[in-house]
Amino acid sequence: MHERWSSLTAGSLLVSVLIAMPVISVFSNVFVGGTAGTWSHLSSTVLPEFIRNTLILCIGVGLGVSSIGVATAWLTTMTEFPGRRFFQWALVLPLAVPAYVMAYVYTDFLQFVGPLQTVLRELFGWKAGDYWFPDVRTVGGAVAMFMFVLYPYVYLLARTAFLERASGMLEAGRSLGLGPWGSFFRVSLPLARPAVVAGSALALMETLADFGTVSYFGVQTFTTGIYRAWFSLGDRVAAAQLSAMLLAFVVLVLVLERASRGRARFNNTSRQQATPTPVRLSRPLGLVAMVACLMPLLLGFLLPAFLLVRMALVDGDAQFGARFLQLARNSFVLALVTALLAVSLAILLGYAARLSRQHLPRVLNRIVGLGYAVPGSVIAVGVLIPVTRLDHVIAGWWEGVTGVNPGLLLTGGIAALVYAYLSRFLSVALHTVESSLGKITPNMDDASRSLGVGKWATLQRVHIPILRGSLLTAGLLVFVDVMKELPATLVMRPFNFDTLATQAHTLASDERLAEASTAAVTIVAVGLLPMFIISRQIARGNRRTVEETEV
């Protein structure tokens, strides 16, 4: 028993160290000398702009996703209006659209020769210079892209908070004379504040990790600076130091989110756990509520999806055929391999934490869980630095033995790219597996051991069959994340190896937006799979709520 437990702990420790290695590598290069010239150039020219644009993005996106997410969650949970049940599940669909795809679509739609301005000129007889039209390729445009794509993070968590905590507290508030607005601002919103902050933190981490949107819009941020320092300047230490500064922003977001949760705690002491009864709105207010829920869905999913499909069908990629199938195969193979490895490692880490009576496996899992908060560009730099050093060591040893220099065997290969994906997305699978394992009563483990079944056999015969649905969901989430990942793939992909994401970015960067639509619409279609699962769970929960209310 003790030997098996030791092997399980050792395995989880090894996996955790490997997954954390990229971040450790980035921090180890912060104080490395030899780059004074590059760093002095960056700090005197573009670094202030990096910081300013990053702060503007964080403030704008944070306020935007909080406002939209809280408003839509409150309306779909606490009020009754036309289309409410549709909006309850449809409002999560914008998560299927990567922000960089939104940027490509809206640029094509809003540019001077795009459909909207063309219609306006024909309708009013305007010519160039006769009117002013906002430029989407700005910091404000980037904020809008992130806002309409990422608000579902806040919507999902805030809606859950309203459902779980609202009923008894609202009744108490009404008994004290609070009206609808007073109940919202003095009861519901404070109760949901931790959920709102957590959802906003997730949205901000996605914003900080983005490369495609800010690069295409020409907004200088840390992610574009990292890419430029590595490829244009050829300075890995400067890239690592910029990565560390970007990581400091991520850590700050996490610290603020944790501090917000730690300052106040809210507990529902009422025994009544029934979901709140929605207040039926009058017809004018119902129409206002319907429009308020329709606008973010329209701007974040319906309009971009329509424009994307139209571009793909009318124009599309001129290389559609064997070339496109090769890109799709590259993307699907990378995503499938990463998803299978991530689920397997998540089972190992989650099971080790479940069996352990010590804190070490749980602490290790929390460290692994931070990977999703680390931007892909930082992960890529953190992987390339140690892998390149290992490659040089192997090449030197091989040349000393055989007299032939084999070159770099690992750098720029598929294995290093999958390693980067695992460092970034293993936490997605781990969180899902841990959550599901926590719902399995420990009595099952005790019963299995009482029958003489070992730990590994118990995992295989008892836990995995119960976890089958959760494991499929975890694998699907990792699969979709890998399909959408752009910065790590751009930095680390092998020579002449492209995916759907890199193809869409390359074509869009060359202003071939219509051709980029074919790869982009495929990425969105794959991203819809987990959104449909989430939407079905929301719809199922709604039906269960109605049945319980009727009973």
Image (spheres, rainbow, N blue to C red):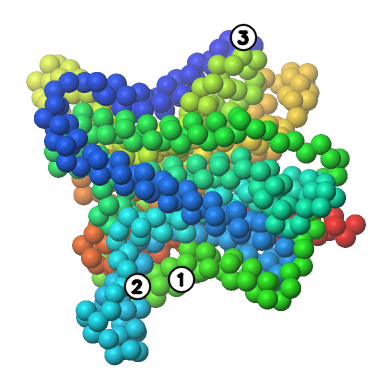
Q: Quadrant of the C terminus?
A: bottom right
Q: Is residue 17 above or below residue 139?
A: above
Q: Nearer the viewer, residue 115 or 508?
A: 115
Per the image, the residue denoted by label 1 is 303
Residue 416 in view in this figure: no
Q: Nearer the viewer, residue 422 or 271?
A: 271
On residue 467, which mark appears? none
Q: How many residues crowd around disc 1 within 10 Å: few (fewer than 14), some, or many (20 or more)?
A: some
Residue type, numbered disc 1: Leu
Q: For the point 27% across and 62% down, which residue is it?
A: 508
Q: For the point 23% across and 59% down, which residue is it?
A: 509
Q: Earlier in the sequence, mark 2 or mark 3?
A: 3
- Left or right? Give the position of 131 relative to 276: left
The secondary element bearing badge 1 is classed as: helix
- Left or right? Give the position of 266 relative to 39: right
Per the image, the residue denoted by label 2 is 109
